Every structure is written in C-alpha cells, then in structure tokens.
Image (spheres, helix red, strand yellow):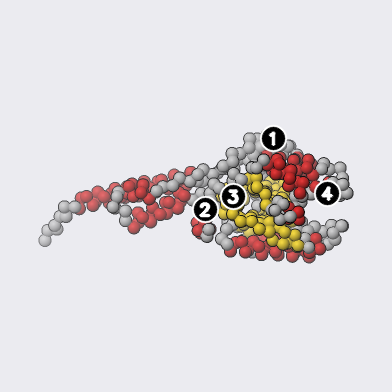
Amino acid sequence: MSRQVDPHEPEERNGAAVATIAVVGLLGLVVSVLAIFRPPDLGPGGATDVSFAQQPTAGQTADPTTRATEAPAPEAQDVLPAPVLRPRGIEKALGAGRVGPIARDLRRKTQLVVEAAPTTFRVATFNVLGASHTGKGGNKSGWADGNTRMSWAFSVVKSSGADIVGLQEFEVTQFQAFVGQAGGAWDVYPGLSEGKPAVRNSIAWRRDTWELVQAATIPVPYFHGNRIPMPYVRLRNIASGQDVYFINVHNPATTRRWGDNERWRDAATSVEIGLVSQLHTAGFPVVLTGDFNERAEVFCRITGAGTMRAANGGSVGGSCAPPADHGIDWIFGSSVIEFSHYLSTRAGLVQRATDHPFVVADALIPPLEPLAAAR
C-alpha cells in the first residue's frame, strides 16, 4: 500500500528546520553572553604613599617596605549592566507558533543566564586607633591627633578602591572627620545612630555601589565581659542586585591595663559564629571583618565548620591550617565567596594613621539563583 502524502508536510519540515537553526543560534548567543559576564579584573586603585598597584594573591603578604607608585583609581562600576532577552524576541527567532517544550525550556534557562551577573566588590578592615589613645592622657604620645590621623586613614581607604570597610576604634571625632571628607559618597552604620559606644565599631560603604536593606547591632562581650554593640548590615549590590550581610567586630585584647581577656575573646567569638550561622539561614552570603586580637585560634574556630573562609587563604573545614601571613585583623567570608588580591600593609600613610595594618581583598560571588529567590 502506498503512503498518502500530507500536503502540509513540507511546511512542517521547514518549520522544524527553522526552529533547529534558531536554537543553535540561541546557544551561540548564550556562549557570547557568558563571555561578556566573565568576572572582571578589579583593577586596583591608585594610592597616596601606599601602593595597591601590585597586589599579592591570596596567601601572600605585601612587603611593608615597598614604597607607593601612583596608579589611576578604578571606575565606580566594575560590572556591566545585564541585558535582558525578552521572550517575544526568542519566540520570533524560533518562529511564531512553533515553540515546543524544549525551546521553551531553553528560553527560560537563557533568560536566567543573561539576566544573572556575578557580584564583585573590594572589602577592607581597618583599626584606625581611637582618638583617645593619642589625645591628652592617652597611651600613644607623639602621634598626630585623631582628626589628622583620620584624614590619612580616609585617604588610604579611598585610594585602595575599597567600596566597603569595617572600622574599629572609630571614635566620635573620627566619625565626624570621615563623614566630612566623604562628602556624602559614603554611608556609615551605626555611626552615632545608636549612641557613642556603638560608633567605635562601624561599617562604611560607598553609596554608588551598595544600598542599605537592613541594619542592626548585637551585644558582644568586650573587656571584663561588658557587652558592646557590634554592627551587622544587609546591603544590596547595585550592579548585580545580590544581597550580602556584613558584620564588623572588635574582640578584647589581653593588656597590662585590662588584664587577661582570653575568656571573653572566646565568648565573643562564639557570639559571632552564632550570628554568622543565623544569617546564613536567611539565604545570603556573609562577610565578617574585624580586629579579633587572635591569630590561629580564631581562624580555626571560624573556618572549622567549612562554611567560612579567610580572604588570605588557609584551610576551610577539616584539619585547621591557617595561612602563613595571618595577623589579628581578619576578613572572613562565606565559602561561596571567591577572594583574591589580598593585601595587608603598614606602608606609607597607614603607619602614620594607626598602629594596625590596612587589610583589603577583592571578592567575587557567582550568580546565586537560590539566594536571589530568597528575597
């Protein structure tokens, strides 16, 4: 028996061929888009007396004797805005009325890839040496006053290209000097919004890079167990739309004046680890900065569970192996965060502004669809 020819069959075949060619072309578009969103090189900013031009990779420490070279500051936006491929355009490419289940699934996945972008930023931690230490009756005689030193410290932060920084020993006059020099380009929390005790540990961020979603403080044990408010904020990256939690702390030192505070450092670290765990359950990455007044011990405790890593390398979970260049000033982040260009330096203006290093690193968070959905 001869097969009967369907008069519409050639048209359907042609339609299928067009759809196949369009799908192949669309896959090429996806590859091109992924090339566009390759993580950008966060070109380091220029510095005044401090060189950020040749930053070591994670696990390396800058030579503090190296003198600065001038380099141009990076542009404010490092991430290109994501183009949106509209469904109607895809349907037109595949042929109206011929978009089957496979094509529709491809369209959906293509939209997710095209619209998603990695989140890149530069984060720092900086103990700026409280103004009271260099004022009348302070323990740092011979140093410049707090306002002058804060001017130098702000210059270091600005020239580094950092867009968010955790500040410790940030007293009232230093906060006022920071705000005055920032000229509205930076926001600070808590600043003076929670009273004088809280200002000493503040988080500052560039307003053209981040917008505030939530802010709060948590009481953390300090000298003799006295509870001091420490800040944490949920910020939204303007370029990518990704939310990130930032925590900034200062744990008590053991000193001749204040005695042995090991017990209270341990208690403070427990509170901070608990807060990190709580914020992780909210579905967003976490960055923890601060002067922890501990080296290997605090590293092992914070990275031990495998959910947090240090910006300067070392182990993540399992047997504890701290990075070789660790000090007491740390940047930690969720394990999904990729750190690079870590730098800890006392060079140039840093050594005139404070008795601590300036610590900075680049961070990249890949597109996190489940986290974005949690909003």
Give the number of the mark in front: 3 or 1: 3
Marks 1,4: beta carbons within 8 A: no
Using the numbered discs, state the Cα–Cα distance from disc 4 to disc 2 in whole angstroms.
Answer: 44 Å
Q: Of callouts 3 and 1, which one flags the residue occurring earlier in the amino acid sequence? A: 1
Q: Of callouts 3 and 2, which one flags the residue occurring earlier in the amino acid sequence? A: 3
Q: Callout 2, which amino acid?
A: Pro
Q: Which mark is residue 367?
A: 2
Q: Callout 3, which amino acid?
A: Glu
Q: Callout 4, which amino acid?
A: His
Q: Is mark 4 on a helix, strand or loop?
A: helix
Marks 3,1: beta carbons within 8 A: no
Q: What element carries label 3?
A: strand
Q: Position of residue 83 (x, y in %)?
A: 45, 45
The residue depicted at 70 percent of the width and 51 percent of the height is: 191
Q: Of callouts 1 and 4, which one flags the residue occurring earlier in the amino acid sequence? A: 1
For label 2, the crowd category at 10 Å Cα-Cα, with few meaning under 14, some 14 to 19 and many 20 or more, is some
The residue depicted at 45 percent of the width and 53 percent of the height is: 112
Using the numbered discs, state the Cα–Cα distance from disc 3 to disc 4 in whole angstroms.
Answer: 33 Å
Q: Of callouts 3 and 4, which one flags the residue occurring earlier in the amino acid sequence? A: 4
Q: Is mark 1 on a helix, strand or loop?
A: loop
For label 4, the crowd category at 10 Å Cα-Cα, with few meaning under 14, some 14 to 19 and many 20 or more, is some
Q: Residue furthest right?
A: 137
Q: Which mark is residue 133?
A: 4
Q: Of callouts 4 and 2, which one flags the residue occurring earlier in the amino acid sequence? A: 4
Q: Which residue position is annotated with label 1?
A: 69
Q: Which residue lies furthest to the left in this view?
A: 1
